[in-house]
Amino acid sequence: LLEMDLLHEILLALVALAALLLLLMVLVAHVTGKMNFPRGQEQKYFLTSTGENEHSPSLHDPPSRELSVVIPAYNEELRIPLMLDEAMQYLENRQKKDSSFTYEVIVVNDGSKDQTTEVAMGYTREYGPDKVRVMTLVKNLGKGGAVRMGAMISRGKLVLMADADGATKFSDLEKVEAALWDLSPKPGNMAISCGSRAHLEKASIAQRSVFRTFLMYGFHFLVWFFCVRGIKDTQCGFKLFTREAALKTFSSLHVERWAFDVELLYIAQCFKIPIAEVAVNWTEIEAPGSKLVPFWSWLQMGRDLIFIRLRYLTGAWKLEPPRKTD
């Protein structure tokens, strides 16, 4: 009987501890979510081919291009030339075939310590600042912050986010674009089309360790349980937005690092924006000198996923209508 009482007391203590930890997590999520982190003033300017600052346009303005390509880049001086060469060749060839097709490429240097800006500026000089613009952030914000900065100064009817490593074949834009229009954007012209690597998952599992596979499935479960359902691959960095959908989602975005894709899609589903998922060609490209530790990076992303949901539930974060700021 004494053993049963002791076991009962231990269970009650564990339940109380779990409740206390949950309450503490909710409190931390709410308080930290209320903090306003300065985004800086860099988004007001981009560099011209002569290296001078010029005022940026705004996503709130009417579109003046068919397509904007936003490329976040952090220490990408070695990989971004291959990506830009492929992208510019595709975009230039498309323009030659269709003179009505206009585009811009926006490279957002996310506080790099290498020559990323100088390398990207070479393309501005070659193609002109009307086609290739470079925004250099003084402080590293994270991939989500960089993509948001670029999206908010884009001029395209469609806005594409693409990774600087060139892991996705750029011509797959055609498949992603076709899927976007297949959604038949309803009044409001809202639609998002996401590139997906889900079809490659079986092959990648065969090459992964059991531990990394466990972490991957754990991450997928957290995404499904807390934030986004119906999308197999939330993390592929090849996503296409109508201008209206980009304004709606990026205006409400808070997460500035790796979990920002999940929040973007969470926001889109909250606003009932239709989302397509399209298989794309994808090659894993390791960053030079990469020190990424999967366990810690995925643990951080898991924390971010939980906090995303808690912050919206507690009202620390709100889905706000797009507002134009000076």
Image (tube, rainbow, N blue to C red):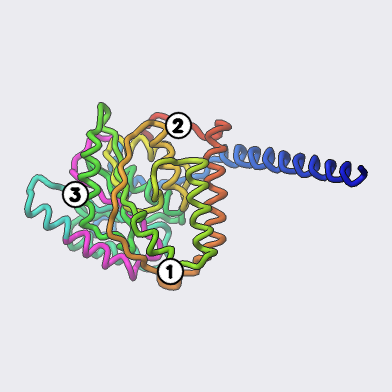
Residue tagged 1: 207
Q: Residue at 21% of width from left, 39% of height from top?
A: 181
**Which structural element holds mark 3?**
strand
Question: What is the span of residues highlighted in magenta in the rendered image?
Answer: 61-89
For the residues labelled 2 and 3, say whether their Cβ atoms are less than 8 Å apart: no
Toward the right, the furthest residue is 2
Q: Secondary structure at mark 1?
A: helix
Residue 68 is marked as none
The tag on residue 103 is 3
Which residue lies at the image location 28% right of the left edge and 46% below the top edge?
Answer: 240
Amino acid type at image mark 1: Gln
Q: Give the mark, 2 or 3, whose residue is nearer the N terminus.
A: 3
Q: Choose top left, top right, bottom left or bottom right for residue 119.
A: bottom left
In this figure, which residue is indicated by the disc labeled 2? 319
**Number of callouts:** 3
Q: Amino acid at mark 2?
A: Leu
Q: CA distance from mark 1 to mark 2?
A: 40 Å
Q: Is residue 231 above or below residue 316?
A: below
Q: Earlier in the sequence, mark 3 or mark 1?
A: 3
Left or right for 212, reference 84: right
